[in-house]
Image (tube, helix red, strand yellow):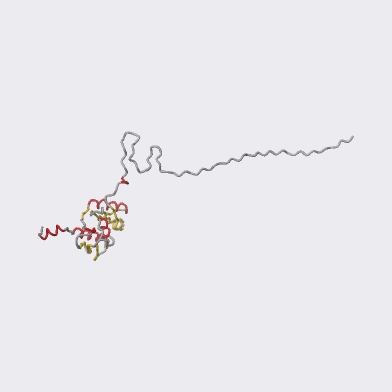
Amino acid sequence: MEKTGIKTEVKPTIKTDVKPTIKTEVKPMTPVTNAPQGNRPANPNDRGGPRRDNRGPRRPRRDNEPKEFEERTVAIKRVTKVVKGGKHMRFTALVVIGNGKGKYGFAHGKAGEVPDAIKKALEAARKNTSMIQFVRAATINHEVQGQWGATNVFLKPAPDGTGIIAGGPVRAILELAGCKNVYSKVYGSRAAINIVRATHDALSQLKSKKEYLALRGKL
């Protein structure tokens, strides 16, 4: 007997792993606030809170303290000194300070670096201050002329609303001293240090009404 061969096709089984989809909710970011966290202060510069130990409260930083004088750098120059080994270069700084209430000062500093020269000038200016008084409209009492070397500075009172008619070093001194209205004119040398000293010489000659009456013998 003949056997009939029956061919059967076997299909491979394919396993597919279907992973479930997971939906994630994206929450909006909350804005960062300056609210204090725990024992930390809201302001990092506020160091006046209590300490963890028993040493008492901390001293506040000097950066937050108000300044007594406003500062302004009028001129910075480079100077050179010829020595045996070569040239020695340094910097000079001319600084003016004032509190806006009639008190002002100026000084000249010299150092190897610009910041050091300015620091020296500020320290010297705080030790050498002058005081002047203004009349109404924040102007000077009368016309006056100051001189230093080859420089002459003329100052004249001005009505309210005029402003400071001056430039450079003269304006720096008058603004920081607190003057609001004045006319000025510079004659001769335009060196910054000479102008500042001539302006100081003019302001030092100002006299009040009582002083003039005393000089005339009418008091």
In which quadrant is the C terminus drawn? bottom left
Q: Quadrant of residue 4?
A: top right
Q: Is residue 68 above or below residue 4?
A: below
Q: Is residue 19 above or below residue 72?
A: above
Residue furthest to the right: 1
- Identify the residue at image location x=16%, y=58%: 209
Of residues 9 and 79, which is closer to you in this image?
A: 9
Residue at x-position 54% and y-position 42%: 25
- Quick one: which residue is furthest to the top in this view? 54
Q: Is residue 200 above or below residue 13?
A: below
Disc count in the image? 0
Q: Position of residue 17 (x, y in %)?
A: 65, 38
Residue 168 place in picture, x, y as percent: 28, 61
Rendering quarter of residue 5: top right
Please name whichever residue, 90 or 119, is drawn nearer the observer in this view of the structure.
119
The answer to whether one can see residue 6 in this image is yes
Q: Is residue 85 something one can see in this rendering?
A: no
Q: Name above or below for residue 11 compared with residue 198.
A: above
Residue 125 position within the rendered picture, expressed as x and y whole percent measured from the top left: 25, 53
Name the residue at the left extreme.
217
Quadrant of the rendering where the N terminus is positioned = top right
Query: Where does the image place residue 90, in percent across and percent down from the top left?
Result: 30, 55
